């Protein structure tokens, strides 16, 4: 007859096997059978607490682990698991005390070191987290989880090359680790190394073919690198995946591939549901404030040298301080730029909330009684939709950063205009559409253009031949529009296409695409990135700006028109594809807006062949530039303030 001790050990081994396989319910049954045989078995009780943690039931886990710590104060594993339960309950100081006590008892305990680092990481203490992970790796250099967590910490410290190296070590130690392959791809996207990112995501796909994030990573690499050879195949896969809900695609990645309003809304809604946990309860419960001035908070990670900052800085400076109190909630790094300093000075308050959690930022908004929160990010890089998900303010607005719906119930309005977003498209938006009287996109009428313009020779351009230009990001370039550009070059011997030198992958792919279309790749001239005033000045060297479709030029269209460079666009079927059309209507050049890609191509060719007509358009643009509403920042300020006041009406 088998002894109770032997039965317990067999049950314990089987329970551990089931637990490791994720069969938590079956494992718990065996742990409870152990307790039937030996009701004080500490290890079985502790493992039931660990199961509760795995199930997200931290309060129940703590109730189990608390008496065990009293019974066995020197048990490092039990104390560490209690620290994890306390951390899950938001009791970080107590959790840290448990981890520290566990390490005092056993200084090299791997799990205690890991959880301590994770606690620092979660708390935003990234330097302390990095120190904890380095200490862990000194004790366990072959622990892939430690290298992986260290990579995540370095990512948050903006040390992207170092993060990539840490993920590579994790993957070398555990070649089957999907998360290390996927995160490597994500870091490579951040570094604009799109060909390498594509390879990393392909590796991740091999490891987990059905993972919902993989296709979005691949699509981002294809877009960012302007990989036109793979573009159409990727588009079909992405649209199908959103339609059948088999993948979670970043909405900004989806926009260039699909103009269908219902699918765009579905993409945004699925992304929000996947990434933003449902808050327990709204922080604002219908209260109305009676402040002397309307309190407006602008939320962004772009309060540094960035396109959004270039557009909005003048508005922030000009807001009517007799009626409005204007605050920045910034979750971006301080890049030390003149733009950052300008914005810090322009706001009444500048709250750097980068290291605060979403709920803590939301509480700060609520406690400060802001009337209106304006999200300038939407679904773009660095967005934090979880902040406004807590509903801290009476009015919450989607504006400027993302030209589409967020697909979430916590944003009340989207600011647009009648051209970019007709009211007929309301069914595709979770926000209520509010029209500004002219172009929705704010512009700063004080943007400096350098006095010195380089020569065409210095810019690598032909001295006399026609220069088509497009300084849009490479991810906006779709095969259909590139085909048109190449046909234009074919019709005009000697002409060139002047593009932004966005990244090495895009340069390589676009040159290959030109060759495949029978155009000498040397006729694509790539402009390196330069300081903003100098970049604006070099627009004077171009003859005509060619817009992209289905995602238009936005800030880049403002750049062209501000510098006096005419722009030809094709009005798309969605918000992001009508922005240039809105600007051209506002500045009094509606004849540069076409309604089909055929008309777009024909107009661009006609203007290139008719210098007198193009000169007349340039002259009218120069006349209208400072007299139209497009670059009248104060006029725009009055319009958006009227919209804010209307939003607060009962």
Image (cartoon, grey):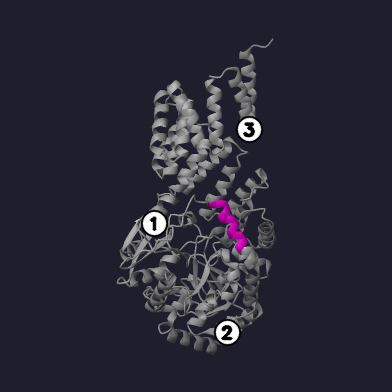
Q: Which residues are magenta?
A: 265-276
The disc placed on residue 260 is none
For the residue pair 362 and 287, the one nearer the viewer reads as 287
Badge 2: how crowded within 10 Å, few (<14), some, or many (20+)?
some
* Horizontal side of residue 638 vs 585, given as left or right: left
Whether the residues at callouts 3 and 2 have beta carbons within 8 Å, the answer is no
Q: Quadrant of residue 238?
A: bottom right
Query: What element does badge 2 sit on?
Result: helix
Q: Which badge, 2 or 1, comes first in the chain's sequence?
A: 1
For the residue pair 602 and 88, the one nearer the viewer reads as 88
Q: Which badge, 3 or 2, comes first in the chain's sequence?
A: 3
Could you tell me how far apart the alpha carbons at marks 3 and 2 are, in whole angstroms?
Answer: 72 Å
Badge 1: how crowded within 10 Å, few (<14), some, or many (20+)?
some
- Examine the residues drawn in magenta and state their main secondary structure: helix
> What residue is shown with label 3?
25
Question: Which residue is at 44% across, 42% downward?
Answer: 121
Q: Quadrant of residue 177?
A: top right
In the image, is residue 326 above or below residue 96? below
In the image, is residue 48 above or below residue 471? above
| Residue 511 visible in image | no
* Horizontal side of residue 418 vs 325, given as left or right: right
Residue 574 placement (x, y as % from top left): 59, 71
> What residue is shown with label 2?
607
Picture quarter with the N terminus: top right
> What residue is shown with label 1?
366
Query: What element does badge 1 sit on?
Result: helix
For the residue pair 520 and 381, the one nearer the viewer reads as 381
Residue 203 placement (x, y as % from top left): 64, 46
Q: Which badge, 3 or 1, comes first in the chain's sequence?
A: 3
Badge 3: how crowded within 10 Å, few (<14), some, or many (20+)?
some
């Amino acid at each position: 007859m088998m002894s109770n001790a032997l039965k317990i050990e067999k049950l314990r081994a089987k329970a551990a096997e089931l637990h490791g396989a994720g069969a938590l319910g079956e494992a718990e049954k065996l742990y409870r059978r152990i307790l039937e045989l030996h009701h004080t078995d500490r290890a079985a009780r502790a493992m039931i607490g660990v199961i509760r943690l795995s199930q997200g039931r931290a309060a129940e886990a703590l109730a189990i682990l608390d008496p065990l710590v009293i019974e066995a104060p020197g048990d490092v594993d039990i104390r560490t698991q209690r620290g994890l339960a306390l951390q899950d309950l938001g009791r970080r100081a107590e959790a840290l005390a448990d981890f520290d006590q566990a390490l005092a008892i056993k200084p090299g305990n791997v799990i205690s070191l890991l959880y301590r680092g994770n606690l620092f990481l979660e708390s935003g203490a990234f330097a302390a987290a990095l120190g904890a992970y380095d200490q862990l790796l000194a004790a366990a250099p072959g622990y892939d989880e430690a290298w992986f967590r260290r990579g995540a910490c370095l990512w948050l410290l903006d040390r992207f090359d170092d993060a990539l190296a840490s993920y590579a070590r994790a993957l070398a130690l555990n070649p089957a680790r999907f998360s290390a392959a996927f995160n490597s791809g994500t870091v490579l996207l951040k570094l604009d190394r799109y060909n390498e990112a594509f390879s990393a995501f392909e590796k991740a796909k091999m490891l987990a073919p059905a993972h919902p994030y993989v296709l979005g990573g691949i699509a981002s690499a294809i877009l960012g690198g302007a990989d036109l050879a793979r573009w159409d195949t990727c588009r079909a896969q992405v649209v199908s995946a959103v339609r059948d809900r088999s993948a979670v695609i970043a909405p900004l990645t989806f926009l260039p591939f699909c103009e269908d309003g219902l699918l765009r809304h579905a993409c945004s809604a699925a992304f929000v549901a996947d990434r933003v946990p449902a808050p327990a309860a709204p922080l604002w419960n219908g209260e109305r404030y009676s402040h002397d001035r309307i309190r407006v908070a602008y939320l962004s990670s772009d309060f540094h040298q960035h396109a959004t900052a270039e557009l909005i800085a003048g508005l922030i400076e000009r807001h009517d301080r007799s009626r409005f109190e204007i605050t920045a909630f910034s979750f971006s790094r301080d890049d030390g730029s003149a733009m950052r300093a300008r914005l810090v000075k322009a706001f009444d308050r500048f709250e750097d909330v980068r290291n605060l959690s979403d709920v803590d930022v939301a509480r700060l908004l609520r406690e400060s009684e802001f009337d209106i929160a304006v999200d300038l990010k939407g679904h773009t890089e660095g967005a934090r939709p979880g902040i406004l998900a807590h509903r801290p303010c009476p009015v919450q607005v989607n504006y400027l950063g993302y030209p589409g719906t967020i697909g979430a119930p916590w944003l009340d309005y989207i600011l647009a205009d009648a051209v970019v977003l007709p009211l007929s498209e309301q069914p595709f938006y979770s926000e209520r559409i509010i029209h500004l009287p002219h172009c929705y996109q704010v512009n700063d009428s004080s943007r400096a253009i350098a006095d010195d313009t380089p020569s065409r020779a210095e810019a690598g351009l032909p001295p006399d031949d026609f220069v088509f230009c497009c300084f849009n990001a490479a991810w906006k370039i779709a095969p259909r529009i590139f085909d048109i550009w190449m046909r234009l070059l074919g019709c005009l011997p000697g002409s060139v296409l002047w593009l932004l030198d966005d990244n090495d992958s895009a340069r390589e792919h676009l040159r290959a695409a030109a060759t495949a279309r029978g155009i000498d790749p040397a006729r694509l001239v790539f402009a390196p990135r330069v300081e903003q005033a100098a970049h604006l000045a070099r627009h004077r060297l171009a003859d005509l700006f060619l817009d992209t479709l289905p995602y238009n030029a936005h800030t880049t269209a403002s750049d062209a028109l501000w510098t006096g460079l005419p722009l030809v666009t094709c009005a798309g079927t969605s918000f992001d594809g009508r922005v240039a059309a809105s600007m051209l209507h506002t500045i009094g050049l509606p004849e540069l807006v076409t309604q089909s890609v055929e008309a777009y191509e024909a107009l661009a060719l006609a203007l290139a062949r008719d210098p007198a007509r193009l000169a007349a358009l340039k002259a009218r643009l120069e006349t209208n530039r400072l007299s139209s509403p497009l670059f009248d920042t104060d006029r725009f300020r009055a319009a958006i303030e009227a919209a804010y006041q209307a939003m607060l009406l009962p």
